[in-house]
Every structure is written in structure tokens, then in C-alpha cells.
Image: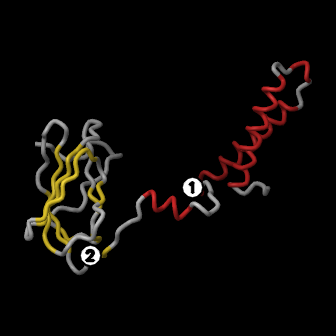
Amino acid sequence: MLTLERNHDFQVFVSPKNHQVSSVNPPRFTWPEQNGEKNYTFVLEHTTFNHRWLYENTSSPVQIPQILPNGDYRWYVSDSNGLRSQWHHFSINQTSQAYLPPSAKELFELCSNREQFMMYFDEDIQEVKQESWLVYENSNALLRLPISMQFNTQIIIEEVKKKANALLLLMCAVGLTEI
């Protein structure tokens, strides 16, 4: 039997919770992957209407691309060695919020005509600012070297220009300067 137990803190919990009503329809199906396994078969069944969904060669998480009818369900996963987990049961009812999340492709399409930004945690911003200035100062120091000390001058200058442009964009992203 394939056990879906967490064996370290970075693994996800089994979801939806066994024998509970899902708060969202369809739920996102997650399980802790074992020993680096990335190739599972996922089976979902509606226990009343005998509907069955089968996803092969998949991994956690699985998102069903449709709203599920109200009722009782069960699901399991099996690994590439044929080991199968126990059945996990859940229900969908009128309190389950219908929500189909957008796909990655849909999200990127929504962002295609918008300016993109890098995001940082608040606690990291000061460190990013300090590191940005350090790179900036080092780049300026290289530009102040006498030509006689620079080898392959043209290559160095082109690399410095690339790094300076990247740094300027980073500094704009964290609010140190404006273009």
C-alpha cells in the first residue's frame, strides 16, 4: 500500500481532508509525494453516479478543470510501481464555493499588456537595496580603472553595460531610483 504520510516539513498535507465537506468546488487534490516520485495515476469517483475521472502521469497537486456535481466522492493515487493509496472520501454540497482557478496560460495572457514587477518580502527589501548598491559601486569602480589595466577592454565594457542596465532595472523595482 502506498502511504501518503508526510516525512518532512516541506511536504504538503493530503487534501481535501478525509470525510469532510470541501469548502471549494472543485477541490485541489494534494498529497505528499514519496521518494521523489513524480509520476502518479490519480483516480476520482463520484460514489452515487458512478462518474470516474482518471489522470495518468501526473503529480501533486491535481486541479480538476470543471465544477463537480454535489455528492460524495472518493479518490486515490498510485505510483509508477503500482502501489496504491487508500481511498480518501469527501463531499461537495451547496456550501462548497464554485471556483475554477485560471490556468497558467490564462494568467500570462492577462498580464501580457501590463508592466511586470519583481516582488520581494518586506523583510528582504533592505538586503536587496544594500546588495544592489554594492553591485552598482563595484561596477563604477571597474569603469574608473585606467585603460592600461583593462584586458579585452571592449568585452569588459559591454559586460559592464549589461550589468549596469540590469542593476538599474533592479533598483527601479525596489524603488531606489526611477528611469
Displayed quadrant of residue 28: bottom left
Q: Secondary structure at mark 1?
A: loop
Q: Kindly identify the amino acid type of the residue bearing the numbered disc 1.
A: Phe
Choose between 160 and 137: the one closer to the eye. 160
Place of residue 179 in the rendered image (x, y in percent of width and height, measured from the top left)? 79, 55
Q: How is the image coloured?
A: secondary structure
Residue assigned mark 1: 121
| Mark before the other along the chain sequence, 2 or 1 | 2
- Give the secondary structure at mark 2: loop
| Image spot of residue 6 (x, y percent) | 25, 46
As measured in the structure, the alpha-carbon distance from the residue carrying label 2 to the one carrying label 1 is 32 Å
Give the residue displayed 84% in from the left and 32% down from the top.
Answer: 141
Q: Residues within 10 Å of mark 1 (few under 14, many from 20)?
A: few
Vertical side of 42 occupied by 101: above or below: below
Q: From the image, which quarter does the N terminus lie in?
A: top left
| Above or below 43: residue 23 | below
Report the front residue among 103 and 136: 103
- Place of residue 134 in the rendered image (x, y in percent of width and height, measured from the top left): 75, 39
Q: Image quadrant of residue 19? A: bottom left
Crowd band around label 2 with a 10 angstrom C-alpha radius: few (<14), some (14–19), many (20+): some
Residue at figure coordinates x 59%, y 54% from the top left: 120
How many numbered tags mark residues here? 2
Residue 49 % position (x, y): 9, 70
Name the front one of labels 2 and 1.
2
Q: Which mark is residue 96?
A: 2
Report if the CB atoms under discs 2 and 1 are less than 8 Å apart.
Answer: no
Identified at 25% across, 79% down, the residue is: 95
Which labelled disc corresponds to residue 178? none
Residue placed most toward the observer, 7 or 120: 120
